[in-house]
Amino acid sequence: MNRDFTDVSMAVIRRLPKYHRYLKDLLDKEVYRISSRELSRLIGFTASQIRQDLNCFGGFGQQGYGYNVEELYKEIGNILGLNRVYSTVIVGAGNLGQAIANYPSFVKYGFELHGLFDVNPKLVGMKIRDINIYDVDELGTFVKENDIEIGIICSPKEVAQDITDTLCKANIKGIWNFAPIDLKVPKDIIVENVHVSESLFILSFLLNEKSKRD
Amino acid sequence: MNRDFTDVSMAVIRRLPKYHRYLKDLLDKEVYRISSRELSRLIGFTASQIRQDLNCFGGFGQQGYGYNVEELYKEIGNILGLNRVYSTVIVGAGNLGQAIANYPSFVKYGFELHGLFDVNPKLVGMKIRDINIYDVDELGTFVKENDIEIGIICSPKEVAQDITDTLCKANIKGIWNFAPIDLKVPKDIIVENVHVSESLFILSFLLNEKSKRD
């Protein structure tokens, strides 16, 4: 199957990783068949939402049978592009960079880490999971020579745009950005942000609202 | 001002941290006044979206003048509950826990870290930013005795629910969860998740879609 999903809304796409995670849990528990109602109870979306979401991709359920968990898990993985390998580098080898390098999903789903980069001479030359930490001066050349597709930015925000410029010049395809800044990139480069402080501020909002009502 | 914002949609609320971040950048650059059009160009929302969003909170702009950056920054901070201090603990003092403990926004915006907790005897007894790492067995007592409001879960997913149960029994108010699992909590406990692998899978989706079109 090589159709593209430009017609599917990003709201639906952004729910797919959650389906993927729950289906993996079901497989780990040796559950091979599930109704949209049971899936709904587990995952917290309505059964009708689930049917609608999955229909965007051709529909996987069978009336009176439900979903084949293994098939659905595999298909959603395919849609998410998890049926292939991605070459990656991490820029910023501090605690966050090391946490990402060791993150189980990262390793498990085909994200191959080829190198970490840092300015700190104490880190350069060390290894994480047998992968070298290089001087950030070598970043551009390394990315170009090794056809790296994804650059993961775990640096302080002050240097994140410079790193991005280096990555883009070296023909990176996508950037996974943890720095609290919106990066400027040429329009064919994909950027996906994890802005953790935004999530923290939503938590403080909710706590503060709750304390007003209590 | 002590009104609550239960009438404002979470979609609007979830955009506030981004406004907050851009307004902070403007203040750092000593820009004290901005039109919704200029703000729109910076932040990437339409000017009409910006006016609509800010109107939900009473509207801050003045016709022909624009927004007072400092006032708007302060008010959005107040709405987000950043005008007070939160007592927190981090459970899981590995790379991710340490990264969060050192995260600049975390320190800057009133999230006071009272302790880290881990099972690893090599970590227990150490300090991060002068804050102790304790044995996780002490978690419940510590949270209760110190009136901790926020528990931050940076543990492997296998133990995240047990940690959550301990936190809830010790009267935690909110949980900031980095483990890739949806936690079960009593309904008065607020949970905010950072599911980093969901973001990674969106990146792989977008890269994979792009490669089909190229």
Image: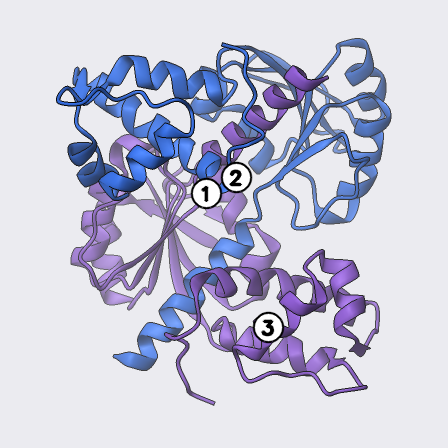
Chain colours: A blue, B purple
Camera-near label (1 vs 3) is 3
Residue B77, how many percent across, how many down? 56, 74
**Subunit of label 2:** A
Q: Residue at x 54, y 56 (%)?
A: A198
| Residue depicted at 75% across the width and 12% down the height | A147
Q: Which mark is residue A10?
A: 2
Element under disc 3: helix
The residue shown at (81%, 10%) is A145
Q: Earlier in the sequence, mark 1 or mark 3?
A: 3
Q: Amino acid at mark 2?
A: Met
Quarter where residue A52 is shown:
top left
Horizontally, is B186 left or right of B182 in the view?
Answer: left
- Tell which residue pokes out farthest to the bottom in this image: B1
Q: Could you give the CA–CA distance between mark 1 and mark 3, rounded to whole angstroms?
A: 38 Å
Secondary structure found at label 1: helix
Numbered circle sitting on residue B97 = 1
Q: Are marks 3 and 2 in contact (CB under 8 Å)?
A: no
Foreground mark, 1 or 2, reads 2
Q: CA distance from mark 3 to mark 2?
A: 23 Å
Q: Position of residue A154 (x, y in %)?
A: 64, 37
Q: Is residue B8 left or right of residue B39?
A: left
Q: Position of residue A55 (x, y in %)?
A: 36, 29
- The residue identified by callout 3 is B52
